Image (cartoon, helix red, strand yellow):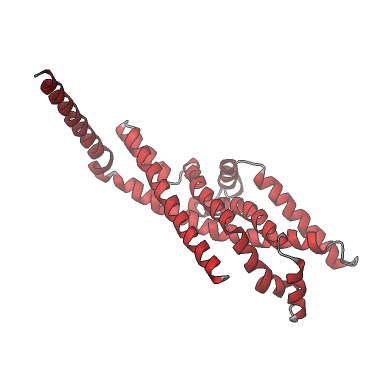
Amino acid sequence: MYSFILANRVLLGIGSWFADKKDEFYMNFIKEDRYMYLVNGLWMTLRITFFAVLLGIVLGVIAAIVRSTHDKTINEMRPGFGKCLLIFFNAIVKLYLTVIRGTPVVVQLMIMYYIIFASSTNAMMVAILAFGINSGAYVAEIIRSGIMSIDNGQFEAGRSLGFNYIQTMYYIVIPQALKNVLPALANEFIVLIKETSVSGYVGIMDLTRGGDVIRSRTFVAFMPLIAVALIYLIIVVIFSKLVTVMERRLRNSER
């Protein structure tokens, strides 16, 4: 008899807990279409991440080529305008890498929005520039390490085929370097996805900001913030799976 009463109380407690969570779910996501804060925020986050990744790759490849070209050829170059130009661009790139990697991304974002582009009303574009420039510094070092790992015989093979230095880098060296550093690049892009969560500092309604708006309306933090965390987790898991598939195909293509 006692065990029956205990089991009945447990079931009633579980039922009451589910009823409370059902009401909480309705209040956080269904009432007044509050789930749209997450939908619109996710769309904003994906757009910022996509264009920032493209910008980061472009800046990173350029910076990596300048740095690796300086390291590989500076001692062999004859004094002249070309050598001075390479030294100058290498100094600019090193300054860029030092400043960007030495300061927090949220500070860079706020400087871009409140100082450099203070007159701009396009917050999304400012965020893309800030995150893209930040990502480019890390991508540059990743790709540079990949280029430096390529044997010098590959450069000589390109020259023997009649390619100049730029053609050798484009057709032979860069493709091999990207294969070598693909896992590191994927990790950088995953970090970039999560770094965009600070976009709310400049008033952008991204995914994290959307969850925080729901919290401020309902005064309940658990469900909206857990939902935001789960969405980020799902995005990262899907992206990691795609990278794993790509790595497997690249390995198979080398056989």
245, 119: nearer the viewer: 245
Residue 215 horizontal side relative to residue 149, left or right = left
Q: Residue at x 18, y 33 (%)?
A: 19
Q: Residue at x 12, y 18 (%)?
A: 2
Seen in the picture, residue 71 relative to 152 is either above or below; the reply is above
Task: Give the total number of marks visible in the rendering.
Answer: 0
- Asked whether residue 126 is in view, the answer is no
Residue 175 horizontal side relative to residue 73, left or right = left
Q: Residue furthest right?
A: 79
Q: Position of residue 149 (x, y in %)?
A: 71, 60
Q: Position of residue 127 (x, y in %)?
A: 52, 50
196, 174: nearer the viewer: 174
Q: Residue furthest top?
A: 2
Q: Position of residue 169 (x, y in %)?
A: 70, 70
64, 202: nearer the viewer: 64
Q: Residue at x 57, y 71 (%)?
A: 255
Q: Which quadrant is home to the N terminus?
A: top left
Q: Position of residue 96 (x, y in %)?
A: 70, 51
Q: Residue furthest left?
A: 1
Q: Residue at x 59, y 41 (%)?
A: 107
- Asked whether residue 108 is in view, the answer is yes
210, 177: nearer the viewer: 177
